[in-house]
Amino acid sequence: MAVSDFPRVLTHLRKDAGISQKKAAESLGVSQALLSHYEKGIRECGLLFLVRAADFYGVSVDYLLGRSLEKNGSAILLEDLPDEDAAGQGNRGAGSLLPVLNKKLICNSVAVVEDLLGASGDKELIQKVSLYLQISVYQMFRRLYNGNAENPQTFFGAPADEAGMMADSAMKKLEAEIQRRLKKVKNLPQMDENVIREKYPLFASSLFNLLQNAETAIGARKK
């Protein structure tokens, strides 16, 4: 989220609490008209209102301003992120084994990409590739989420009808930036099929299957 999301966050918190705009305004010590302006982004609030709203809704100022996705304002630390396999059976979908197999295929292949990025030693390249992958996951999650029309859109910043185009545009820009950055990276290792199998004995099979599936999907290989 960004600071510009403050009106949306403020509105979402009120609606999520089941409070009318009139009652919220009374509790926050402002007129309903002024609160309406804050929620619509027509006017910017002062520091006093910001602190009062944070206390009233039981969230941090950072959350209200879009600086944190956690209501208590905490930042996500590396040690807080679970390992991919830590979720275990609890988060595994029931039924078909296919999603589980595809998950391993994708995760193992991404592990190879991450290792190559680490070998590059280029922080800018690492960041741009990471953003590209994150947006890709965002796009698919958003599409699946939107598959149920009753799901609320409150915690998304991009409107549902614009998110896909915005994501596509950002990914195209990142592709160009990644390509330019790669021209400056000199220490990526030489590779062929044998080197990949030797260097990544646990992940090579997954990677080769992913490459084959992807090329089939884009029409470069026959089914």
Image (cartoon, rainbow, N blue to C red):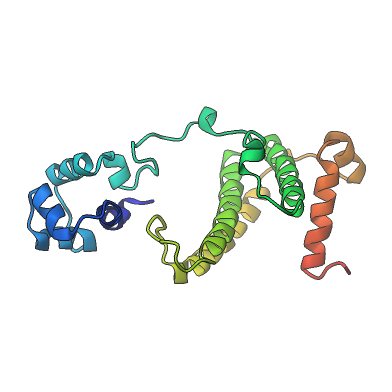
Q: Nearer the viewer, residue 116 or 151?
A: 151
Question: Is residue 47 placed above or below 132 in the rendered structure?
Answer: above
Q: Nearer the viewer, residue 38 or 178?
A: 38
Q: Residue furthest front?
A: 95
Where is the C terminus found, in terms of image quarters? bottom right
Residue 114 location, quadrant: top right
State the image coordinates of residue 135 (x, y, percent, origin top left).
55, 55
Q: Residue furthest top?
A: 79
Question: Is residue 90 placed above or below 168 in the rendered structure?
Answer: above
Q: Residue at x 33, y 36 (%)?
A: 72
Residue 21 location, quadrant: bottom left
Q: Nearer the viewer, residue 115 or 107?
A: 107
Residue 157 location, quadrant: bottom left
Q: Nearer the viewer, residue 42 or 70?
A: 70
State the image coordinates of residue 160 (x, y, percent, origin top left).
45, 67
Q: Residue at x 57, y 62 (%)?
A: 144
Q: Is residue 82 left or right of residue 6?
A: right
Question: Does residue 177 appear in this view?
Answer: no
State the image coordinates of residue 44 (x, y, percent, origin top left).
18, 55
Q: Residue at x 74, y 45 (%)?
A: 104
Q: Is residue 170 left or right of residue 195?
A: left
Q: Is residue 194 left or right of residue 5?
A: right
